[in-house]
Amino acid sequence: MATSRTPAQGSDEPSGTENGLPDDEPMAQDDPAQDAQAEDGEGPALAEPGQRLLARIVDTLIVGLPIIIVVKEFVSGHELDIVAPPVVAGCMLLYEAVQLALWGRTLGKRFAGIQVVPDPSSLEDAATGAEETETASSASGLPHASYGRPNVPRAVLRAAVYAVPIALRPVHIVGLLAGLFWVANAGFIYEGTRRQALHDRLAGTVVVKRRTP
């Protein structure tokens, strides 16, 4: 009669019960693909400060240069210093707010390869429009490659925070404070992990690299 075989005492033969697992059940192993997906977020990378500066220079030239040329045809001297800043600021606000609301990019940002998207951490439960349908958070906490775009209130607020100090430059004392505000606004990019300037934080936006044209 056949008898069940048991490993001899002191034998090197492994036993399926020594590790607390049945002989026919393999030990669980880590999935390298799953680990790589967890470590590598699918969201777009944050825009570099140099890209943002390039985009701002291009936008300023596109809007400011023609406006100054036109204004100089009507006013000159000290009046030019008073009239030009508010006119440039108004045109910059309209130029930026419309393009951000429609595409999330101005001409300068297209040239620099970046885009403004809603910050997932600031989206409300009742998000509307493009924010609700086109924005999703990836493993990195940034929007997926669909990018999305700011809604109209966010686009207007973001553009206004940057443009209003330009309009205030002719005002004594206030103009000086506006200049200091610009310095602080740019400095906020280096505070925190999302490279958000002050106008990004107030409007709830993030600037990311655009992978495709």
Image (cartoon, grey):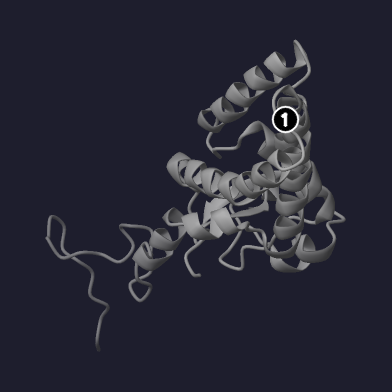
**From the image, which quarter does the N terminus lie in?**
bottom left
Q: Is residue 139 visible?
A: no
Q: Position of residue 195 (x, y in %)?
A: 54, 38
The residue at 54%/60% (across/down) is 110
Q: Residue furthest bottom?
A: 1
Image: 20 above or below 120: below
Image: 59 above or below 25: above
Q: Position of residue 133 (x, y in %)?
A: 76, 68
The residue at 78%/32% (across/down) is 83
Q: Is residue 53 visible?
A: yes
Q: Please give left or right for residue 172 compared with residue 146 in the image.
A: right
Q: Position of residue 77 (x, y in %)?
A: 69, 25
Q: Please give left or right for residue 158 compared with residue 145 in the image.
A: right
Which residue is nearer to you in this view: 34 or 192?
Answer: 192
The residue at 49%/69% (across/down) is 212
Which residue is nearer to you in this view: 110 or 39?
Answer: 110
At label 1, the amino acid type is Leu
Determine which quarter of the picture holds residue 131.
Answer: bottom right
| Tag 1 residue | 80
Which residue is nearer to you in this view: 131 or 17?
Answer: 131
Q: Residue furthest top?
A: 173
Q: Please give left or right for residue 23 compared with residue 6 in the image.
A: right
